[in-house]
Image (spheres, rainbow, N blue to C red):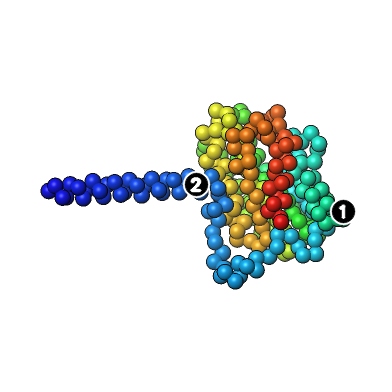
Amino acid sequence: MRTSGKLLWRTAGLLSFLSFLLLATGFVLAMNPQQLAPATGTSPAESAKTPAPLPAEGVRKIVALGDSLTRGAGDANGQGYVGLVRQALEKKAGHSITFTNLAINGQESTDLLKQMSEAQVKTLIADADLILFTIGGNDLFRQTGGLYTIEQEKVAAAIDRLTTNYEEIIRQIRALNKKATIVYTSLYNPFGNTEAAVDTVQPVLDWNNSASQIAARYPQVFVVPTYDMFLRKEQSYLYTDHFHPNTEGYSRIAERIMQALE
């Protein structure tokens, strides 16, 4: 009986330890959603031949799509991250780059799909070497009556809708342009230092995870994370509206994108 009791306690202890490991692993993965993207199953030889992020012939035309983050709202210099990325690529290449910013303040994923159905937009996408876009912030957080009041059911429904639209956006871009590099900048949490933090952390992490998994199904689509950059640095990197990045915040996003493109 004494031996059985010891065995029982040892078994219970082992199970408790394993549960702790699972919770710790889940937390680490949640903080870095890209780790959850499915592996492509390539052999070591194939992995060594991973294509370069940018076309070998260089970037001549950039098209930017999406919402106010791509428009550059909150940047005192009026450039946003896309303007900074363009400048960095021009400096690196030694020649000018044709740049078209089609982003619209307040745009949601449904609006972007409608915009992409326009003939001129299709032509611009088809001719681009690099396509930059953001979408999702308005889908998730324009569902409430106040800035810091989050309605979980509406946010959950918005994520479902956004997931469907986001994949369709990537599918249509890739159908129009087989070769261009596509860069999606995922979401940070602008409410991380407010009373809404507890209700917004998980939806943002869940969405970023879904965005990475969907992007992994398509060639030359890169998801650039920003969540970690703004975490506990909201006062430093957010504009006075406490939603959009400020000049320094956009600079950090541009740096992260350039790192992904190297």
Disc 1 secondary structure class: loop
Q: CA distance from mark 2 to mark 1?
A: 41 Å
Question: Which quadrant is home to the C terminus?
Answer: bottom right
Which label was assigned to residue 61? none
Image height of 33 relative to 53, above or below: above
Between 103 and 79, the residue placed more toward the observer is 79
Q: Is residue 171 visible?
A: yes
Image height of 218 relative to 15, above or below: below
Amino acid type assigned to the residue bearing label 1 in the image: Ser
Q: Position of residue 171 (x, y in %)?
A: 66, 59
Image height of 146 relative to 253, above or below: above
Q: Position of residue 138 (x, y in %)?
A: 65, 39
Which label was assigned to residue 96? 1
Q: Residue, x 53% and y 45% (percent of image)?
A: 31
Q: Position of residue 130 (x, y in %)?
A: 76, 56
Between 73 and 176, the residue placed more toward the observer is 73
Disc 2 secondary structure class: helix
Q: Quadrant of residue 239?
A: top right
Which label was assigned to residue 28? 2
Q: Quadrant of residue 146?
A: top right
